[in-house]
């Protein structure tokens, strides 16, 4: 099943960009003046080159794939996850832990849940299961945070490159000091680079970084819930007691 688009993110981008352009238009500014291929090349492409220097290749790929994660986040409802775990607990209580082996091998089973089930069915102790799975969770979280840091790095570099573009534009404008009209136009164009730097940083890069971090935190809560559920199933905890344990995770994520 394909992930649904996150309309809140899309709406936020449209409102942010629209507010800036709309405010510029209301101030009787020329919309055409904001579009500059030179400023785009210096600021966006130039800062991207700096990010490539500062970021390992794997983290760059994680950051780029984070765009899809933000726009089409995984559909993993915590209440549905809890109910699924309780269903598995009931099956294991009636038929034994080996009855869940078929669930672990189904292609539609969540990969993380399947890995936990395999560990439990193979006879791993609760402590060994926790050690292995918590390490897995920590590594996945590091990858998510690395993708977020890619956008944070880009967002921190962009404004400075925007200032660099403005200075280059001013140098170009001052070379036309003999014609004041051209100087004024050149100065206006120069400051477009600053707008690009600050705008791209605060409307695109940093919001993407914050959203990726938040999604990573929610995913950690979900995986912790799955781990707690599988350990509970392996230990033979009654479904009612297991429900109380798992509900805490769902409430914590909803409050966050």
Image (cartoon, rainbow, N blue to C red):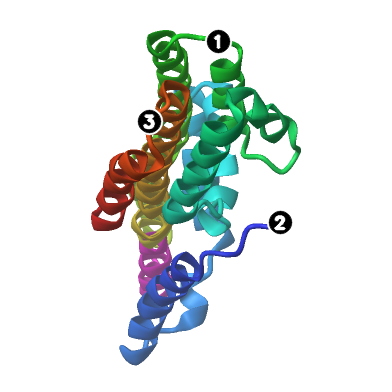
Spatial distance from mark 2 to mark 1, Cα to Cα?
Answer: 32 Å
In the rendered structure, the answer to whether residue 70 lies left or right of residue 240 reads right
Q: Residue 202: where, in percent of width, then height?
A: 34, 56
- Please tell me whether mark 2 sits on a helix, a strand or a loop: loop
Q: Residue 162: where, in percent of width, then height?
A: 38, 50
Residue 175: image tag = none
Judged by depth in the image, the label closer to the viewer, 2 or 1, is 1
Predominant SS along the magenta part: helix
- Residue under label 1, please give it: 123
Q: Residues within 10 Å of mark 2 (few under 14, many from 20)?
A: few
Q: Residues within 10 Å of mark 1 (few under 14, many from 20)?
A: few
Which image quadrant for residue 109?
top right
Numbered range of the magenta stretch: 178-192
In the rendered structure, the answer to whether residue 26 lies left or right of residue 62 reads left
- Residue under label 2, please give it: 1
Q: Which of marks 2 and 3 precedes in the sequence?
A: 2
């Amino acid at each position: 099943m394909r992930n649904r688009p996150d309309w809140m993110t899309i709406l936020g981008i449209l409102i942010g960009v629209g507010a800036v352009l709309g405010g510029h238009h209301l101030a009787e500014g020329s919309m055409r003046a904001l579009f500059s291929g030179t400023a785009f090349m210096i600021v966006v492409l130039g800062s991207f080159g700096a990010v490539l220097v500062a970021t390992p290749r794997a983290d760059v790929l994680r950051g780029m794939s984070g765009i899809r994660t933000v726009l089409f986040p995984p559909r993993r409802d915590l209440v549905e996850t809890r109910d699924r775990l309780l269903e598995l607990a009931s099956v294991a209580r009636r038929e034994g832990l080996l009855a869940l082996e078929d669930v672990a091998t189904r292609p539609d089973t969540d990969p993380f849940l399947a890995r936990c089930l395999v560990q439990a069915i193979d006879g791993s102790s609760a402590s060994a299961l926790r050690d292995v799975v918590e390490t897995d969770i920590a590594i996945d979280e590091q990858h998510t945070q690395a993708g977020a840091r890619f956008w944070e790095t880009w967002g921190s570099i962009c404004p400075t490159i925007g200032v660099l573009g403005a200075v280059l534009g001013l140098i170009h404008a001052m070379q036309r000091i003999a014609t004041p009209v051209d100087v004024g136009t050149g100065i206006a164009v120069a400051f477009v680079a600053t707008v690009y730097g600050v705008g791209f940083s605060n409307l695109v890069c940093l919001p993407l970084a914050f959203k990726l971090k938040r999604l990573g935190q929610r995913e950690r809560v979900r995986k912790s819930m799955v781990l707690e559920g599988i350990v509970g199933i392996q230990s033979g905890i009654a479904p009612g007691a297991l429900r109380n344990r798992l509900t805490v995770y769902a409430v914590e994520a909803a409050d966050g």
